[in-house]
Image: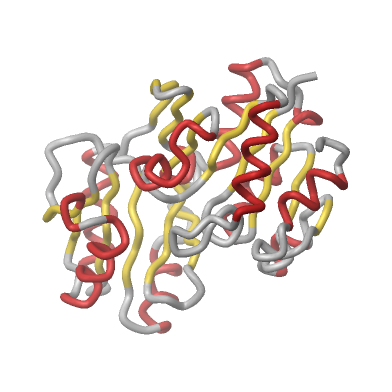
Amino acid sequence: MQKIFFFDIDGTLAMHGQIPPGNLEALRRLKQAGHLTFVCTGRPVFYAEALFGSLVSGYIACNGRYLCYQGHRLYTRTLSAKALASYRETIDALSAGALFLSERAAYAYHLSHAQLCSVQAEYGQERIFAFPAQEDLYSFDLYYAEPAQRDALCRAFEGRLVINDHGGSGSCDCSTSDWDKGSAINYLLGHFGVGRNDAYAFGDGYNDQAMFRIAGHGIAMGNAVDALKAKASYITDTMENDGILKALRHEGVL
């Protein structure tokens, strides 16, 4: 029976753009077995596609707001002009910065020189432009200078956004309160006619809790945050120690 698998990127499938050989093997074997595989990330789709190409069936990008399958868009939820104005007002009030994400580019908003250099190194200088954008935007990352500013952002956006801090690195990705990774997974289960018990989600971060809300099998990496481990149906080994392959064997998939 065909099953469907969802994988976070950072800390699950890869780290700093480097994919462990065991994870590549896992994706190849799932594809060969005829299963559906989706990368499910807060990152923009252009970043995910550059890493995995056609090795997976499709992508859930921008924390669920951009879905594509075999190179074709299935579903998107853009940020409205009204929402963007509201988000920018809060960002401005707290002297923070943001990186707004589209299908093929990212738009810097009030980033410091160091922050701008960091995102250019991560995504490629040719992908980074100054805000505003002349195309649809799907999500954004917040940038802060110190933890107190991050905490103020979390308080200011409470009820509007779910904020996932990147380990105190100076940035956070955001999910809207009405649509997240779990919402996108639920959409795909309906689209492909796959039951929740045949859905497997692998993650390590706070924003991956949304995947576990929907998928019948929520598998936390050994390096996952405690909040995710508490909601997991199974805790596997770390990313570096072939945690994905080990979990797939434990679940009887491989």
Front position in the image: 196 or 126: 126
Identify the residue at image location x=50%, y=56%: 162
Quadrant assignment, res 28: top right
Identify the residue at image location x=44%, y=69%: 155
Which quadrant holds the N terminus?
top right
Identify the residue at image location x=42%, y=58%: 173
The image position of residue 33, as x and y in percent, is 72, 25
Depicted 195 relative to depicted 244: above or below: above
Q: How many marks?
A: 0
Front position in the image: 121 or 185: 121
Front position in the image: 204 or 173: 204
Depicted 236 relative to depicted 146: above or below: above
Which quadrant holds the C terminus?
top right
The image position of residue 212, as x and y in percent, is 70, 46
| 41 on left or right of 86 | right
Q: How is the image coloured?
A: secondary structure
| 129 on left or right of 169 | left
The image position of residue 220, as x and y in percent, is 73, 56
| 78 on left or right of 244 | left
Quadrant assignment, res 143: bottom left
Depicted 114 relative to depicted 21: above or below: below
The image position of residue 226, as x and y in percent, is 72, 69
Identify the residue at image location x=73%, y=57%: 243
| 86 on left or right of 154 | left
Front position in the image: 203 or 215: 203
